[in-house]
Amino acid sequence: MNIPRFVEELDSLRRALGIDKWFVNGHSWGTVLALEYYKAHPEHVAGIVFGGSVFDWRAYARETNVWTKQMSDSAQRAIAAWKAGGSADTPAFKAATDEFYSKFVWRHPVQADLDSTNAGFGSEQYNYMQGAYEYVVTGTLKDYDARADLRKIKVPVLSTTGEFDEVGPKTVEAHAKMIPGAKFILYKGAGHVTSWDATDANVRDVREFLRSADRR
């Protein structure tokens, strides 16, 4: 469960498909994988889409703390009690977790996609690399910081985020500005998973980006 292994798995897919050069579309932790894949195999990348990018995980942890303070009083108390050693099985904590997800992760989930995501979710990997929940970063990625690599990207880049993205839209935009020539798009009313919260606009913008990069 480490980045080089995931990079190799992705490139093994490219090789199996017989593709010489492709566009890499990464979301959330997938933006880390997309960036690290580009660093390892720049000759095989035609362009990159970063959705809800997490290039500074300490900043991400700070942003989730800011969002948590905007939640209901009962949710804040439940999360504080859990962080102090309380049980994650209490109804109050479960309600608080649901509230966080519904406000800052996905606001309008596509049910079929949510079901398939939950069915194939890698809990062991998530806990090891991220932590127990979205608003705590205690895993192996907690100190990941790739900001210095962003200015070295030499392919077309599209960076997107939502108005209520748990990663922090201002943080995502600041990182996008570090990438030469990158296009940044913010979706109003969307959370972290913009492919659900702003589906039509997100698909349209990604397709236009791909066509534009192909024309170049």
Image: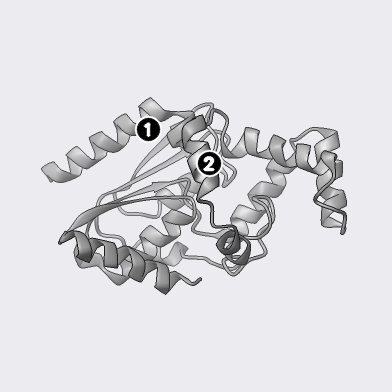
Q: Which mark is residue 202?
A: 1
Q: Nearer the viewer, residue 136 or 56?
A: 136
Mark 1 secondary-structure assignment: helix
Which residue appears farthest toward the left when viewing the image? Answer: 215
Q: Which residue is nearer to you in this view: 76 or 123? A: 123
26 horizontally vs 137: left or right: left
**Position in image of residue 89 (x %, y %):** 81, 48
**Above or below, comparing residue 116 to residue 12 in the picture:** above
Query: What is the three-letter code of the residue carrying label 1?
Result: Asn
The residue at 43%/66% (across/down) is 148
Q: Who's the residue at 83% across and 39% down the image?
A: 91
Q: Say few, some or many: other residues with alpha carbon within 10 Å of mark 1 (under 14 / 14 to 19 / 20 or more).
A: many
With respect to residue 21, does 52 lie above or below? Answer: above
Pointers 2 and 1 in contact (C-beta within 8 Å)? no
Q: Residue 2 shows which numbered tag?
A: none
Total count of labels:
2
**Does residue 171 appear anywhere in the picture?**
no
Classify mark 2: helix, strand or loop.
helix
Residue nearer the viewer, 93 or 155: 93
- Which is more N-terminal, label 1 or label 2? 2
What is the three-letter code of the residue carrying label 2?
Answer: Pro
Q: Which of marks 2 and 1 is in front?
A: 1
User: Local crowd at mark 2 within 10 Å, few (<14), some, or many (≥20)?
Assistant: many
Picture coordinates of residue 214 (x, y %)?
14, 44
Left or right for 64, reference 21:
right
**63 with respect to 48 (left or right):** right
Q: Position of residue 3 (x, y in %)?
A: 45, 70
In the figure, residue 100 lies in which quadrant? top right
Residue at 32% across, 68% down:
39
Residue drawn at 80 percent across, 51 percent down: 88
Q: Mark 2 points at which residue?
A: 169
Q: Quadrant for residue 104, please give it.
A: top right
